[in-house]
Image (spheres, rainbow, N blue to C red):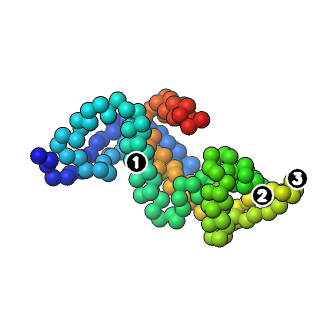
Amino acid sequence: MPTPARRSTLIVGHTNDHAVGGVMKKFKEVLVATTPRVDGDEDIGELRNIVGFHIRLAYGAVYRHFTETFEHIDLTQKQSALLWLIDDNPDIAQTDLAKRMRMDRATTMAIVNRLQARGYLVRGKSSSDGRKQTLNLTDAGRAALVQAKSAIQEHEAWLKARFTQKEIDQLIEMLTRIHE
């Protein structure tokens, strides 16, 4: 019989240095599970060996924390990533942005339209190819990106606190093998 839902707490046993706002800080963090546990739920049987199952659980935890970190900023993950890529690549063509984001053109256009409607970016004509539209951030877009980067740094510190730098490098390499 399941016990009443409770929040479990885990103390991370190591600290990591992370740059937050340009300042190196040490993090030793108390992690609170976002999903209540019940007696017996640790017995997941053969699912324990299913990589995709663990990726889904990890994605859920990371997405929940990202959403909580971004609740004061009215931007999604994709919108933040688009602003960042546009800032890093002035005059980027919308089609090139879609390729870098690994999104279809229609989805990219919808996000670009929303960001343009909010005054975060402007479209222009490419000087080298008149058929292409270029994208650039406005001052409001750069200000929104500064807020987003700060929230992303906070989120990344939360996530990376679980790993050593070597483990972070390995995790990125392994995840890249999956998505490329």
Kindly indicate whether the residue at mark 3 contacts the one at mark 2 (C-beta within 8 angstroms).
no
Within 10 Å of the Cα at label 3, are there few (<14), some (14-19), or many (20+) other Cα atoms? few
Which amino acid is tagged 1?
Gly
15 with respect to 176 (left or right): left
- Please tell me the numbered disc located at residue 128: 3
In the image, taking residue 19 as reference, residue 3 lies left or right, namely: left
Tell me where residue 95 appears, x and y as whole percent: 73, 52
Give the image location of residue 18, x and y in percent: 49, 42
**Name of the residue lying farthest toward the left:** 1
Residue sitting at x 64%, y 51%: 104
Q: Quadrant of residue 40?
A: top left
For the residues labelled 2 and 1, say whether their Cβ atoms are less than 8 Å apart: no
Dot 1 falls on a residue whose secondary structure is: helix
Residue identified by numbered label 2: 134
Q: CA distance from mark 2 to mark 1?
A: 34 Å
What residue sits 53% from the left and 54% below the top? 77
Q: Residues within 10 Å of mark 1 (few under 14, many from 20)?
A: some
Mark 2 vs 1, N-terminal side: 1
Determine which residue is flagged by label 1.
60
N-terminal of the pair, mark 3 or mark 1, is 1
Element at label 2: strand
Q: Quadrant of the C terminus?
A: top right
Amino acid under disc 2: Thr
**Vertical side of 54 occupied by 63: above or below:** below
Q: Is residue 9 above or below residue 139?
A: above
The alpha-carbon separation of the residues under discs 3 and 1 comes to 43 Å
Residue 126: image x %, image y %?
84, 57
Does the rendering let one see residue 125?
Answer: yes
Amino acid type indicated by mark 3: Ser
Q: Residue at x 38, y 43 (%)?
A: 57
